[in-house]
Image (cartoon, rainbow, N blue to C red):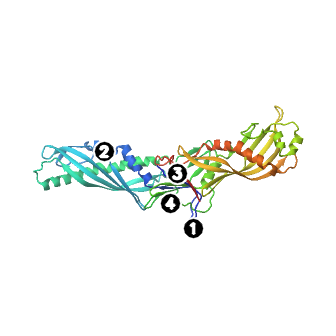
Amino acid sequence: MLRILCLALCGLLTGTRADPGALLRLGMDIMNQVQNAMDESHILEKMAAEAGKKQPGMKPIKGITNLKVKDVRLPVITLNFVPGVGIFQCVSTGMTITGKSFMGGNMEIIVVLNITATNRLLQDEETGLPMFKSEGCEVILVSVKTNLPSNMLPKVVNKFLDSTLHKVLPGLMCPAIDAVLVYVNRKWANLNDPMPVGKMGTVKYVLTSTPVTTANYIQVDFNPVVQQQKGNAIKLADSGDTPEFPEGYAEGSSQLLLSDAFLTAELTLLQKSFDVSVRDTMIGELPPQTTGTLAGFIPKVAEAYPKSKPLVTQIRINKPPKLTMNTGKSLLHLHGTVEMSAVRRRGKPPVSLFVLEVHFSLKVQYSVRENRLQMATSLDRLQSLSRKSSSIGHFNEKDLTVFITDYLQEAYVPVVNDELQVGLPLPDFLAMNYNLAQLDIAE
């Protein structure tokens, strides 16, 4: 389980520079997927089942025939990070080996053992995906019990067991490590797949380099590709700063850092869906959306339309959305136009009263659902308001500040929230479940 999802504005790290986007720290909580993989794959049991079968090129073991393995104990896996390499893995398990002994009777050997190996973390040259590769596998005997007669010479028994087990166990157990890593590596398989952002485009998380292992975590750097549905990739704004993980998270936990530049690029995919045309006369708690109501703010409207007419309002976002983050607060900035028109008799187009240029900001609250980052907004404030054109003559647009502010909150923000429900996809790695992640906004 990912404990921390950190949505962070780029921190400063002087003297270095990195592509903006996404950084991932895999703590030991995530790497325990290796334990889950061994449990899910039942690989030790499968290896035990194969032990008694004749394998190509395998020489018979002197002194034992009809070899079989049973009663494999549930493995306990201990992992440690190896800086610059990957993960050191120790699998503690046990089993019972049976067969016909050199004395002709049934033999039973109960062994407890440790399997150790280093799982080197690499980047697959063909796919670009991370991958683990096992090396240096060893089998260490912890204890051995046997039903061989106690009156046999101890040295003879020990020599026989030592010779037998050292022949049997590495060939039996070490392939299990490789098989488990194949199972784990499959869980990276979807990482490079394009993931949809509604119907407007896709996001693909591309590794910038081979992941780096430290004493406490594995760091994965992404250069995400935000692609329009039928168009070019959206370039992420480059501040020249390197994103940096905030301090103070629980030891062993994992963090995902998403920069504001990356989230802004994703929201740009949704820009067209933020354009709306509203014809409803009654909206929430607002007064009726008519020329009569508007005349209370602009008297010239009453002169042009003595008889009240319904209004139709069009909001167009003419600049890409921009997301900003400061500690504990995130704002979505939208720049566009608000055009209000009077509705005429059926069959005739509405008549534009005026067009206003607006810049307003929305407060953003984050959550995670179905491994997607969800945003819910509320109006922060109307940042600026200016008149672009007017068919009713000159008026002071500042008189409309309260009217437009209320309109944006009641009529427009719900539309934005509906569009944001598509969610922004998070990296799909190791079958990760983000739903219980803790979200922080840091600067």
Q: Which three-letter amino acid code belongs to the residue tagged 4?
A: Gly
* Nearer the observer, 14 or 62: 14
Farthest residue toward the left? 151
First in sequence: mark 4 vs mark 3:
4
How far is disc 2 from disc 4 in space, using C-alphas? 43 Å
Q: Which residue is mark 4?
A: 248
Image coordinates of residue 210 in percent, x first then y, are 48, 57
Q: Which residue is mark 3?
A: 438
Which is more foreground, mark 3 or mark 2?
Answer: 3
Local secondary structure at mark 3 = strand
Q: Which three-letter amino acid code belongs to the residue tagged 1?
A: Thr
Residue 116 located left or right of residue 297: left
Q: Which residue is mark 1?
A: 14
The crowding category of the residue bearing disc 2, from other C-alpha atoms within 10 Å (few below 14, some 14 to 19, many at least 20), is some
First in sequence: mark 3 vs mark 2:
2
Q: Which residue is mark 2?
A: 47
Residue 286 located left or right of residue 172: right
Q: Which three-letter amino acid code belongs to the residue tagged 2?
A: Met
First in sequence: mark 2 vs mark 1:
1
Residue 415 located left or right of residue 439: right
Which is more foreground, mark 2 or mark 4?
Answer: 4
First in sequence: mark 2 vs mark 4:
2
**Placement of 19 over or under 407, stated as above or below:** below
The crowding category of the residue bearing disc 3, from other C-alpha atoms within 10 Å (few below 14, some 14 to 19, many at least 20), is some
Image coordinates of residue 442 in percent, x first then y, are 58, 58
Image coordinates of residue 280 in percent, x first then y, are 74, 36
* Nearer the observer, 412 or 162: 412
Split into 4 quadrants, where in the image is the C terminus? Answer: bottom right
The crowding category of the residue bearing disc 4, from other C-alpha atoms within 10 Å (few below 14, some 14 to 19, many at least 20), is few
How far is disc 3 from disc 2 in space, using C-alphas? 40 Å
How far is disc 4 from disc 3 in space, using C-alphas? 13 Å
